[in-house]
Structure formats: structure tokens, C-alpha cells
Image: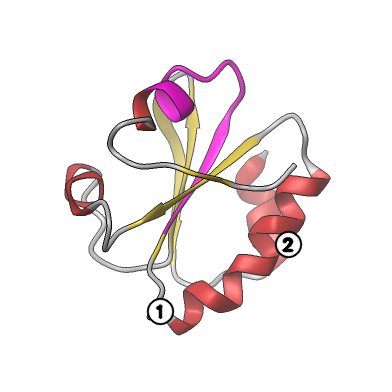
């Protein structure tokens, strides 16, 4: 399963109301580390069908970025039951992200 693009209009439904845990990637097109992380995010989405994966473009959804106090990207947040359960900032190797999902 691939990552789902989310925005202010569908964030609540896709992320906050999800039955599954949701890994949210806050990213931007111009961000080099975000581009390096993107294939790893897609691999995680494929390897973990029990977890939904969403991507938020911070340039297109600044209100979401501000609402979750994103001041550096890439930023990843794991939501469980509509709440942030874990988070990390900056490029991370796949092993670190696997640990974040546990």
C-alpha cells in the first residue's frame, strides 16, 4: 500500500479517525532529506499493511504544519487513536523508522 496524500480537508478522517496507526510524513518538494526519505516511507507502507501512511506537503498545508509545531522537515509522526504516539525529525535510516513503528 502506498502513502496517501493528506491535506487540511481530509486529515481528520484519514489520520485522526483511522482504525489503524498512521505514520504521517511532513515534507516539502524542495527538501533534499525529504526526497531521500521518500523511498523508505514507500517501502514501509508496502511492508506494513497494518499501518496507514500519509504525507503532508507543508508548503500546501502550512496550517497543519503549524498546528503540529513542525519547524524542521522531514518530520514523521506516528498517530495511534488520533494522538501522536511517537515522532522524529530529520532523515532516518529504515531501521530507526522500523523501531518508531513498534
Q: Specify the quadrant of the image occupied by residue 27.
A: bottom left
* Residue pictured at 35% horizontal, 25% vertical: 12
The residue labelled by disc 2 is 95
Q: Are marks 2 and 1 in contact (CB under 8 Å)?
A: no
Residue at 23% x, 64% y is 71
Vertical arrangement, residue 40 with respect to residue 65, above or below: below
The percent coordinates of residue 69 (x first, y second) are: 21, 51
- The quadrant in which residue 70 appears is bottom left
Which mark is drawn over residue 31?
1
Q: Nearer the viewer, mark 2 or mark 1?
A: 1
- The quadrant of the picture occupied by the C terminus is top right
**Region of the chain picked out in magenta, as a range:** 13-26
Q: Nearer the viewer, residue 65 or 69?
A: 65
The foreground one among 22 and 1 is: 1
The secondary structure type at the circle numbered 1 is loop
Let me know if residue 9 is in the magenta part: no
Q: Secondary structure at mark 2?
A: helix
On the image, the x and y values in percent for residue 88 come to: 45, 57
Amino acid at each position: 500500500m502506498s502513502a496517501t496524500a493528506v491535506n487540511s480537508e481530509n486529515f481528520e478522517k484519514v489520520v485522526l479517525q483511522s482504525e489503524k496507526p498512521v505514520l504521517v510524513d511532513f515534507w516539502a518538494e524542495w527538501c533534499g532529506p525529504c526526497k531521500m526519505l521518500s523511498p523508505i516511507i514507500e517501502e514501509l507502507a508496502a511492508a506494513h499493511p497494518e499501518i496507514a501512511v500519509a504525507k503532508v506537503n507543508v508548503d500546501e498545508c502550512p496550517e497543519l504544519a503549524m498546528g503540529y509545531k513542525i519547524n524542521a522537515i522531514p518530520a514523521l509522526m506516528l498517530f495511534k487513536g488520533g494522538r501522536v504516539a511517537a515522532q522524529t525529525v530529520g532523515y532516518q535510516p529504515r531501521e530507526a523508522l522500523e523501531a518508531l513503528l513498534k
